[in-house]
Image (spheres, rainbow, N blue to C red):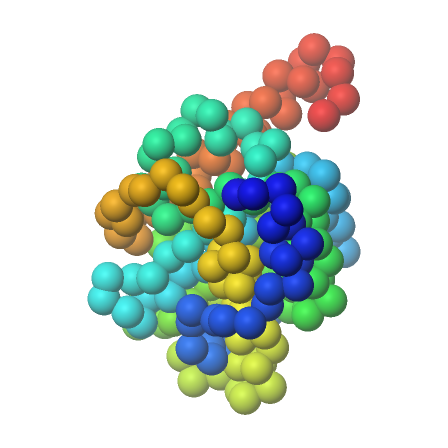
Amino acid sequence: MHRGSRPRLRALFAVALLPAVPLDLSACAGSGGIELERGKPTVVTLEDVRLDPPRTIGLMSENHPGVQRHDSALRRSGYKKAPQEDVDVLLDRLESQGLLTYGVRVPQLVALDPALAISRLSVSVDDQIVQIVVPRRPPREAAERYSAMARSVTEMFNAIIDFRPAKMEADDETFLDMQRKLFESNRDKLRAQAKGGTSP
């Protein structure tokens, strides 16, 4: 991505890939006072299992330890790298739209059951994962809230230009497997730092 395009990237919130999708407020217990730090390795994902094959995209910060290790696989799996400062701006926007109010902290992401859910937004920062899962037939207010968050993610995803062509071969299993690898690579780095007595 050209350096000069960063200001444009922050202002480019115009096109959404996903249609309006709902959120079941009753299914969200909140994230238990969790705070997502800025400047840390971050992964943001969107999954829509209503489509065949499922539509899955992800954004990850440039400082993520999994970037170099899985770079070629990343491009095939539906992920794009973004400058850390832009990812932090995205986190600010998602939190202002209710991510931490309506999201739930989970130890890991598991495959969605299409009979029960239609979409999911997840944010991983260091060793913390917060997700919002959209069940079927949710209230309108929740649908609009989730749609706003989904637009924030897809607009940034669309604004990032990848000049290295790669065929999009990901299916739902590939996407989840890559997300797990990214989470584990960052967790391993954090553990190594803790053992060595260094700060992240």
Front residue of 126 and 70:
70
Question: What is the residue that sits farthest to the front in this orientation?
Answer: 4
Q: Which residue is at a point 51% across and 36% down the rendered structure image?
A: 183
Number of marks in the rendered image: 0
The residue located at (73%, 67%) in the rendering is 96
| In front of the other: 18 or 156 | 156
- Residue 170 placed where, x, y %? 28, 48
Which picture quadrant has residue 2?
top right
Which image quadrant: the C terminus? top right
Counting from the top left corner in percent of width and height, residue 163 is at: 40, 42
Residue 107 is at least partly visible in this image: no
Left or right of residue 56: residue 90: right
The percent coordinates of residue 87 (x first, y second) are 64, 49
Residue at left 47%, top 59%?
A: 158
User: Do we see residue 200 in this rendering?
Assistant: yes
Residue drawn at 63 percent across, 58 percent down: 8
